[in-house]
Image (spheres, helix red, strand yellow):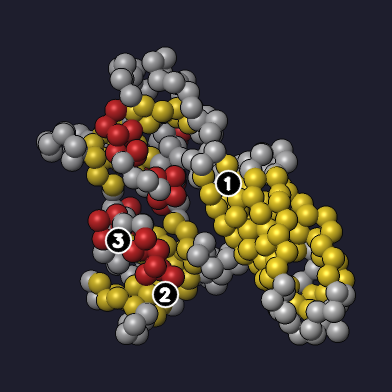
């Protein structure tokens, strides 16, 4: 691999053993939710093997390209990996229902996909949709855009059930020399700050999906960072909403495994058939993430 010149700015990510430096680091920092939209670096910068003369760097979800012919501040672009990887499937539906969909480039962007699209940069970030809803063999629903693929995860709470596919990783594995995955040392003049999570992911679970009207419940809270590693010392509150209007709140702190446990919640005389909902908000060093779940009262 080529030797790296000294850089004046950058960041080392110990999770993958790679740096982001120079204009790529400036671009990465310019996006508030970079950890969600780009992911962690998989490689260092290296010259593209396609003869284009571009410098590229792979991340979990994207590839950055450096275009030296463009003005400073506009030289970093995100590759159209969605276009490069998309292969039309046989099992697709182009939904265009008014009120829940927006038709772009002939394709409907709908429901939670549309919410995610608008919240995270829209056309400027993802490009045009290039597919309808695609139904994968595993039952997952996806939609391709020029620079991304949206995946729907119905098992996750509302508001957290759309995630970006790891297109950077997929494209790298199919087209690049795996030697570029070799970890690198942090540059001497770049402070190592990677121990701090870049984002949080919170999940909440109950021990019993169904309980008696007078019973106990146990609650588990899991907090992870952007690499799905455990976050120790995250603090927050779980609020339990009972059908009759009573609310109970419990503080929670995560352990070394990123798990917080509320051992015993006692309740009595709840209406049979009622739904008990739980909301949790966890914070760590200025980051915040929320999650929700529920359980049913039965006879």
Q: Position of residue 97 (x, y in %)?
A: 35, 85
Left/right placement of residue 77 relative to residue 149 reads: left
Residue in the image at 30% along x and 20% along y: 8
Q: Position of residue 285 (x, y in %)?
A: 54, 38
In the rendered view, tell whether residue 143 sits above or below residue 254: below
- Residue picked out by circle 2: 111
| Label 1 – label 3 distance at C-alpha | 27 Å
In the rendered view, tell whether residue 52 sits above or below residue 241: above
Question: Which disc number belongs to residue 283?
Answer: 1
Q: Give the mark toward the camera: 2 or 1.
A: 1
Question: Which disc number belongs to residue 122?
Answer: 3
Question: Which disc number belongs to residue 212?
Answer: none
Front-most of 197 and 85?
Answer: 197
Q: Is residue 290 visible?
A: yes
Q: Give the mark toward the camera: 1 or 3.
A: 1
Secondary structure at badge 1 equals strand
| Label 2 – label 1 distance at C-alpha | 28 Å
């Amino acid at each position: 691999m080529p030797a790296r010149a000294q850089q004046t700015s950058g960041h080392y990510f110990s999770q993958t053993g790679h740096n982001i430096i120079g204009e790529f680091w400036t671009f990465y920092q310019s996006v508030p939710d970079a950890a969600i939209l780009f992911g962690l670096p998989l490689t260092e910068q290296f010259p593209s093997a396609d003869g284009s003369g571009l410098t590229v760097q792979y991340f979990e979800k994207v590839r950055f390209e450096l275009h030296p012919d463009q003005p400073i501040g506009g030289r970093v672009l995100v590759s159209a990996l969605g276009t490069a990887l998309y292969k039309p499937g046989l099992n697709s539906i182009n939904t265009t229902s008014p009120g829940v969909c927006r038709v772009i480039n002939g394709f409907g962007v709908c429901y939670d996909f549309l919410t995610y699209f608008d919240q995270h940069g829209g056309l400027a970030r993802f490009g045009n949709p290039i597919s309808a809803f695609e139904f994968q063999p595993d039952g997952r629903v996806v939609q391709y855009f020029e620079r991304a693929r949206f995946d729907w995860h119905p098992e996750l709470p509302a508001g957290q059930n759309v995630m970006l596919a790891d297109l950077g990783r997929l494209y790298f594995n199919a087209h690049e020399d795996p030697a570029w995955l070799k970890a690198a040392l942090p540059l001497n003049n770049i402070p190592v700050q990677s121990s701090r999570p870049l984002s949080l992911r919170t999940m909440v679970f109950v021990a019993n999906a169904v309980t008696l009207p007078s019973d106990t419940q146990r609650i588990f809270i899991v907090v992870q960072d952007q690499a799905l590693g455990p976050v120790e010392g995250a603090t927050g509150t779980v609020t339990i909403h009972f059908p009759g209007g009573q609310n109970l709140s419990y503080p929670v702190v995560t352990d070394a495994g990123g798990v917080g446990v509320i051992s015993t919640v006692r309740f009595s005389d709840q209406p049979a058939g009622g739904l008990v909902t739980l909301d949790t908000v966890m914070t760590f060093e200025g980051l915040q993430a929320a999650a929700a779940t529920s359980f049913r009262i039965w006879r």
